[in-house]
Amino acid sequence: MSDARVQQRLRAVVGASVPIEHGPGDALVVSPPDDHRTAAILETASAERWPVGVRGAGTWSSQQPNALITIDPSEMADVTYLDPSDLVVTAQAGMQWSSLRATLAEHGAWLPIDPPGERRSVGSVVATGTAGPLRCGYGAVRDHVLGATLATGDGKLMRAGSKVVKNVAGFDLVKLATGSFGAFGLITDVTFRLRAVPRADATLVARGNRDRLLQAAFAILERGANPAALELYADDPDDDWILGVRLIATDEGVQAARDTVAGAADLPFERATDGATLWRDHAAHCLEHPATLRVGVPPRALPAALDLIRHDLGPGWTSATVFPGAIRWSGASDVDRIKVFRHHAAHQEFPVTVERAPVDNLAVLGHFGAYREGVGRLIGSLRTAFDPHGIFVVPERAA
Amino acid sequence: MPLSPQVRAALVRIVSDRWVRAASAQLETFARDALPTARSIPGIVVLPGTRDEVIRIIRLLAHHEVPFVARGAGTGLSGGALANNDAVLIALTRLNRILEVDPQNRLAVVEPGVVNARLSEAVAEFGLLYAPDPSSQTACTLGGNVAENAGGPHCLKYGVTSNHVLELEVVLPDGSVVTLGSRSGEPWGPDLVGLFVGSEGMFGIATRITVRLLPTPPSIRTLLADFDDLTTAGRAVSAIIASGIVPAALEMMDQVCIEVVEASIYAAGYPIDAAAVLLVELDGATDDQVAAEGAAIEVLLMRHGARSVRAASDAAERARLWQGRKKAFGALGRMSPDLVVQDAVVPRSALPEVLDSIRAIASHHGLRVGNVFHAGDGNLHPNIGFDRENPDEFERVEQASAAIMQVCIAAGGTITGEHGVGVDKRRYMTDVFDADTLDGMARLRQAFDVAGIANPGKVIPTHACREWTQGAGRHV
Ligand SMILES: Cc1cc2nc3c(=O)[nH]c(=O)nc-3n(C[C@H](O)[C@H](O)[C@H](O)COP(=O)(O)OP(=O)(O)OC[C@H]3O[C@@H](n4cnc5c(N)ncnc54)[C@H](O)[C@@H]3O)c2cc1C
């Protein structure tokens, strides 16, 4: 179909006021203002078999080159529901994460997700399931999501979940949205469970040898501590590492936790004077390299997994969430090395997700590579169920 | 259609005669779960003793396209474990081994028939516990918890079942075996563990469950506050939630419930003239910490209209306060021959008005309703006593339940927070989900179970799905 005809069809669907532009590559970028028009675009795309890409804030992953149209949710960027007393918010997918955080703070509310990267959008954080160090104390992205609106590949709107903090009505469609990289639908809004702004928030840091810091982290866990973050990271894995321990509670709770940490670990911890900046810098680091991988590793297997990463992938920014166990590595996007690593990791039962990489590399690697036995068929069925004509360009598996 | 003799014989070959129940008196004992308003006699009951037997059973049934229903302890409150006479009921209580406890990685691997409380007992020696603690925890199984995404009082701070399941081995309804998730909780691809938890037995049978364990908090403080009226108590709940102190648990009981508990063997010392009591539990690393937080909460409670607040002085008193709460259903059950334990969720700030409405509904239908619930989550459990032999009363219970659901929905809530939809709540699904969303659920189910043989007829009101109404005729 000619570009002009695609544009004409799109125009008929979205109306005169909605921007349709030529993006990088040949894709037409359309920015629907609401979920109904998003669904209408997808319905048409499905009927016409147009490959569709989705743009987040554009800072995390790059655009799909082989999409005929790209949906840019940036016009959907509002908080549509906020109840500070019930601690629930609904934010549209195109909203900047930092704006959401600022809006919540004005109302005394807080969302304990600290995604890597900068200028992320709400939709991108949820679709990629990219939690940061706070995952240690507060859980993965999916643990904060109460509801989401998902526009499926055939243009239906599924309003999954609810605005209350506990809900088992029907199957949990919300889990289709979190961490699937958009394979089952485009997220138009997300409802999160919030917390009251913490009363006290302190960060302790120690520097030194990787394994010594890791042993200290284990000792902290063994004392029964539940830090908000327990993150071991290094710019250069051959150099000094940093153990960051973030404690969030009441004043008394933070004091008690500091005592536990001091008692457990024989390390010269310093209290960070500006914890917020420290963690913001930490989040920004992985963008300094073209590829970012996430590896699931039970805590006690971290030393072996860190060695494997160093050996197979080479140097790079490396950050381990000691509990429940995950490593984020950012470095060179070397397809062959990543493949070898993924193969070795699979043998040890460590799931690897390629969170970001240059598009051509990602097309070869796939976000998830190969699935376990039997699982691939299940995911294939899910994809067919929610995107019958396979219009979403999501490289979930290796080519 | 009743089961063929061929299938029966094959089932006996798999588990032996000893573990098959086919006589009508035997089947009768499996005709109900804890939902008193529904009953169904299964075609046959099998009790496999190993996961291999489960796999062989499912492969057999898949081959013959015979429907099956998994059953744990049968404590479900939505009729989820009921099977029709054309279906095989697979009781999993014999798969009750704790396969592995890994204290260093804070996890355990269990078979589905392990009783919830047994796991916490077994890991206590390592200073660990399994957090989700349904009030039925001394009876219900972890398989049933996974299927229902069970909650409990301590889920306010620690999250529900879905937040604690890391990895699952599942026998899919076609007989294939898949492992979902990983021991670190990081998924291999999309979040299939998240999709499976809460699937009410309709996506397959979980045969191996890896859960996260948490350290036992070194220090705990339990407070009891009493109030002159429910509305004030409801406001106090909102004030605590907004305070930034997250209690481990925040439970409420109303006057009917207090009276019944205090008149029972579980008497906990709740003031019987109170309109409501709040049980607030704080936990933390040190006594100083929980004492300070307890003092702050106490001030907050008094400022928000509590008549008095008292702290449990020792472990025995704490256990007694909790026993009253955990056994409240049992005590309420004694006030009448039958008890409907309702379950709905509302925004926490709507609790006062919704509780008022529930009271009005009860009196309108001439029924006695006792409320005991997870106030911190806005998760209500209005309990309605009745006698199922009395058709008029039964009808009024059904009407009152429906009216309560409508009030909760109108307040921005939902129809179940932890007991599931099962057969009981299918009728309300269209009140909370539109046709496309329900159709999404049907699609999801079909991806896991093409033939539609795992626990058919539950959860989805088939007539209301868009595709269904358009005549596509899916199996759901
Ligand atoms: C007094 C009382 C108090 C309760 N309190 C709570 C509470 O506080 N919180 C709460 O959440 N619930 C509560 N419940 C409800 C009930 O205990 C839970 O839903 C529990 O999770 C059911 O477990 P079960 O083993 O009894 O499952 P069953 O009732 O036997 O089955 C429930 C469902 O799970 C499915 N199932 C069972 N095992 C498996 C498996 N291995 N794989 C796949 N599907 C399976 C069945 O098919 C069925 O659909 C309470 C019930 C009672 C009677």
Image: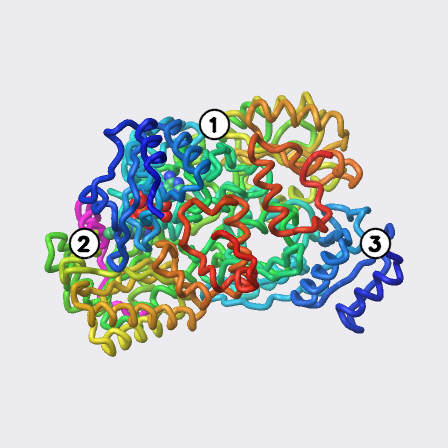
| Distance from Cα at disc 3 to Cα at disc 2 | 63 Å
Answer yes or no: are tags 3 and 2 on the same subunit. Answer: no
Sooner in the amino-acid sequence: mark 3 or mark 1? 3
Q: Please, which chain is the residue tagged with disc 3 on?
A: A
Q: Residues within 10 Å of mark 1 (few under 14, many from 20)?
A: few
Q: Is mark 3 within 8 Å of ligand 1?
A: no
Looking at the rendered image, the disc whose residue lies closer to the viewer, 2 or 1, is 2
Q: Can the viewer see residue B221 in this picture?
A: no
User: What stretch of residues is rendered in magenta?
Assistant: B304-326
Which image quadrant is residue B264 in? bottom left
* Residue at mark 2: B330
Up the image or down, A114 lies above or below B234; here it is above
Front position in the image: A49 or B343: A49
Does B136 appear in magenta? no
Identify the mark at residue A399; answer none if there is no mark.
none
Up the image or down, B467 lies above or below B129; here it is below
Q: Is mark 2 within 8 Å of ligand 1?
A: yes
Tell me which residue sits at (24%, 39%) in the image: B22
* Residue at mark 1: A266
Answer yes or no: are tags 2 and 1 on the same subunit. Answer: no
Tell me which residue sits at (24%, 57%) in the image: B36
Could you tell me if the residues under marks 2 and 1 are in contact, i.e. CB atoms within 8 Å?
Answer: no
Tell me which residue sits at (32%, 35%) in the image: B8
* Residue A67 position in % (x across, y down): 79, 50
For label 3, the SS is loop
Badge 2 amino acid: Gly
* Residue B177 position in % (x across, y down): 48, 32
Tell me which residue sits at (42%, 56%) in the image: B459
Identify the mark at residue A27; answer none if there is no mark.
3
